[in-house]
Every structure is written in C-alpha cells, then in structure tokens.
Image (cartoon, rainbow, N blue to C red):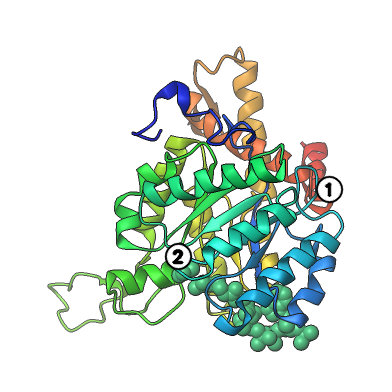
C-alpha cells in the first residue's frame, strides 16, 4: 500500500466521478502480450485476425516506434481499437493494452489524454515504461482518474510498470503497492542492462560469457573443465515475482530480441514461467505460439496435480495430513502448488478450446 495514503483512502477514487479502484486484480490469461506498432500498416492489417488467438494485443507507442510516427501510432491505435470487434473490455477473448511513451518524453501526456477519452472503455491495461518509483505511478493514477471521470468510464483502467532502471528495481515493492490499479510488472532487460551499465548488447536472453566453470580435477589438472551458462535475469525476475506475489499482482518476462533463436526464446520464457511469471512479451508473430505453449501448464503436470488434489481430498479435504504418491510425500504445501497448476489450467481451458481438449482428454484417461 502507498505510504502516503491512509488505509481507508486507498480504495477511494482519486477524482470525483472516477470509477472505484479495484480491491483485487483478476487473473485474466495473459500468456503472450503481443506488441505491434499501430503506425505500421502491415502489422495493423494483421491485428483483426489475431483476436481470439492471442491473450493480449498491445499497441506500442514507445521504443521501436520512430519519433516521426508517434502521432500516427497513437491515432492508429485509436482506429484499430474502435474498428476491431471483440478486442478489449472485460468480456472480449483478447485484452487490449498499450505501452505509452515514458513519462519524461514529449508524448506521454498526449498519449493519455488522447487514448482515455477515445478508447478508454476498451483499454484494459496501460503499460508505463521506465518506472522509477511510486511517484511515477501516483502521477499516472491521478491523471487516469481525472480522465476516466471526464470520459464517464465505469471501469478503472489498470496500470502495468516496466522494470527497466536500477532505481526501479531498488523500489520494486513500493511500485507494486503504489496504487490499487497496479496490474503487474514486466522485465525490461534491454533498458535495464543499459541503465545498470551491464556489458551486453542484446534485447533479453543470456550471454555465453556469464558462466561458472567446474573446479579442476586435482588428479587431471589439464582435463577439460565444463562450463555452465547462468541466467543474467534470475535475480531481477525473482525480485519481481516476490514483489508481485506480495501485492496480489502479476509478473511477466519481457522482450526476447533474437527472433530467429526460437529455442533460446523458449528456454528464457520457461525459466520465467517456472519462477512464477504468468506471461511474456511477443515481438513477432512466431513468438506467440512459443509463449502460449510455455505459459500453459503441460498436460503431464496438470494430470499429476489433479492426482495430488484427489489424494489429499480423499484424506479429508482440509489440506492436513500427508500421503505417499509414486514414492513421494505430498502434504498441504505440495497440494497448494498443485492447486496453482489446476486453477491455471482451468482459466486457460476456458479461453483456449485446443488446450481444453488436451486437459479434458487426460481427465478421461485418469
Ligand atoms: C526493448 C523493447 O522495447 S522491445 C518492444 C518494442 N519492440 C517491438 O515492439 C518490436 C515489434 N516487432 C517488430 O518490429 C518486427 O517484428 C521486427 C522489426 C522485429 C521484424 O519485422 P520484419 O522484419 O518485418 O519480420 P518478418 O519479415 O519476419 O515479418 C513477417 C510478417 O509479419 C509481420 N510482423 C512482424 N512483426 C509483427 C508484429 N509484432 N505484429 C504483427 N505483425 C508483425 C510483418 O509485417 C510481416 O508481414 P508481411 O508478411 O505482410 O510482410
Ligand atoms: O522495454 C523493454 C526493454 O527491455 O527495455
Ligand atoms: Mg525499454
């Protein structure tokens, strides 16, 4: 919770007539947040067909959009949101998000004052880049409340922060708790690497130089010593996951810029999934399928999780006690992990008919 507001005020609207802030952030499937540049006619043309096939479509207005195209991107997003059926809003199969320009840029204010009146009812989440601390969220929070009140919106637009500065990482817990609108965090490995003065030149992913080497064998000092590449982003993602879990919001991996390396992309996404992230960014259409697959629990894991839930239910259903399953001890702690899997599988099955078929098939086999 914000340090500057009392508990009773935290969930009051920040402007007269603005919608009431949410007390809980719903767990809507968001395995892939697919980025597109609304000023790029080829990308824009593909958006209607992507509705229903990707969990989130994000009209990007920030980095990767040329300065000369900033206005066209903003206007393009308004047009796409207005003309595309079933996109955004609470009931659509595909959420509509945007990434506005950074708050110190010449464009951020116009991004918000244009988008909220024009397409506020369809916009689910606004992603704010380069968030440094709670003060950035407080600024967006108040401005959104004013704009929502003026536009007569009845549902608050949620806010998502990109963690991509050293100060942002240092302030991660206060950013997550700065507003009841906070929906989640994404890792921004490219800007974060630059801000930290890391010696990398990539957009996310690993680096072959970041490794540990096996100790020498005293009996064979000249023998080959294998090396093991380490994950540059483990520390930051782990901090994000804890900060988000503590505040009841959702962590995401960010961009993986090596579009051609689908194998390493899948590995990076899976590390984030296993650590607790709920989704990732997709920069190119071919990353959508990778994200959807990685951020959906496997049928084997869901089958196992259901067996643990059934075994613990047979014990009385209150979570107490322990059972042996396939030689392994299961108790309340493993039951809770299994419930995370089962609940996620149910949420995804509700929006993904192909996945539903796979999960249903294993239920019938069991
Ligand atoms: C560090 C950060 O901030 S990351 C976030 C910001 N970056 C982005 O948002 C990048 C978004 N993606 C892109 O700009 C592009 O995918 C690029 C530049 C990486 C590659 O683009 P291309 O060289 O055109 O890729 P490619 O030729 O494989 O594209 C195939 C088709 O998919 C389209 N396409 C490519 N990316 C996308 C996308 N993100 N959404 C929709 N369509 C896309 C292309 O327009 C092309 O269409 P066509 O068949 O009608 O010609
Ligand atoms: O915006 C994303 C990043 O990695 O920087
Ligand atoms: Mg960035």
| Residue at figure coordinates x 37%, y 77% from the top left | 207
Whether ligand 2 has any atom under 8 Å from the Cβ at mark 2 is answered as yes
Q: Nearer the viewer, residue 256 or 7?
A: 7
Taking 243 as reference, is 7 above or below it? Answer: above
Residue 99: image quadrant is bottom right
Picture coordinates of residue 295, whole percent (x, y):
62, 54
Which residue is label 1 attached to?
357
Query: Count the marks: how many?
Result: 2
Picture coordinates of residue 92, whole percent (x, y):
80, 48
Taking 220 as reference, is 115 above or below it? Answer: above
| Residue at figure coordinates x 14%, y 74% from the top left | 219
Residue 26: image quadrant is top right
Can residue 232 be seen in this snapshot? yes
Q: Residues within 10 Å of mark 2 (few under 14, many from 20)?
A: many
Q: Nearer the viewer, residue 202 or 292?
A: 202
Q: Nearer the viewer, residue 65 or 247?
A: 65
| Residue at figure coordinates x 27%, y 74% from the top left | 197
Residue 231: image quadrant is bottom left
Picture coordinates of residue 316, whole percent (x, y):
61, 12
Disc 2 on helix, strand or loop? Answer: loop
- Closer to viewer: mark 2 or mark 1: 2
Q: Is residue 122 left or right of residue 206?
A: right
| Residue at figure coordinates x 35%, y 34% from the top left | 4
Q: Is residue 100 left or right of residue 275?
A: right
Which residue is label 2 attached to?
188
Picture coordinates of residue 32, whole percent (x, y):
65, 60
Screen quadrant of the N terminus: top left
Can residue 37 be seen in this snapshot? no
Taking 4 as reference, is 137 above or below it? Answer: below
């Amino acid at each position: 919770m914000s340090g500057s507001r009392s508990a009773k005020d935290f969930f009051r609207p920040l402007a007269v007539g603005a919608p009431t802030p949410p007390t809980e952030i719903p767990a809507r499937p968001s395995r892939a947040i697919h980025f597109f540049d609304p000023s790029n006619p080829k990308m824009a043309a593909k958006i209607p067909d992507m509705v229903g096939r990707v969990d989130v479509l994000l009209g990007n207005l920030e980095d990767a959009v040329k300065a000369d195209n900033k206005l066209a991107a903003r206007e393009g997003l308004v047009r796409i949101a207005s003309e595309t059926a079933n996109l955004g809003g609470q009931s659509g199969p595909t959420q509509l998000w945007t990434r506005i320009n950074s708050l110190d840029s010449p464009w951020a204010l116009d991004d918000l004052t244009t988008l909220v009146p024009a397409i506020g009812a369809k916009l689910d989440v606004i992603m704010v880049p380069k968030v440094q601390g709670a003060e950035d969220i407080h600024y967006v929070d108040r401005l959104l409340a004013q704009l929502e009140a003026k536009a007569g919106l009845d549902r608050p637009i949620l806010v998502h922060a990109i963690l991509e500065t050293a100060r942002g990482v240092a302030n991660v817990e206060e950013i997550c708790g700065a507003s009841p609108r906070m929906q989640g965090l994404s890792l921004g490995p490219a800007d974060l690497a630059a801000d930290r003065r890391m010696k990398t030149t990539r957009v996310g992913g690993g680096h072959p130089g970041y490794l540990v080497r096996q100790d020498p064998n005293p009996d064979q000092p000249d023998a080959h010593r294998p090396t093991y590449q380490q994950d540059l982003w483990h520390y930051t993602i782990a901090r994000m996951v804890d900060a988000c879990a503590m505040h009841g919001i959702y962590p995401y991996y960010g961009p993986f810029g090596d579009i051609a390396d689908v194998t390493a992309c899948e590995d990076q996404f899976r590390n984030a999934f296993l650590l607790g992230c709920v989704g990732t960014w997709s920069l190119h259409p071919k990353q959508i399928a990778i994200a959807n697959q990685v951020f959906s629990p496997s049928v084997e894991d869901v089958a196992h999780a259901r067996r643990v839930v059934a075994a613990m239910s047979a014990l009385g259903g209150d979570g107490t006690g322990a059972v042996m399953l396939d030689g392994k001890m299961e108790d309340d702690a493993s039951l809770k992990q299994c419930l995370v899997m089962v609940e996620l599988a149910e949420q995804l099955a509700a929006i993904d008919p192909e996945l539903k078929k796979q999960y249903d098939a294993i239920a019938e086999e069991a």
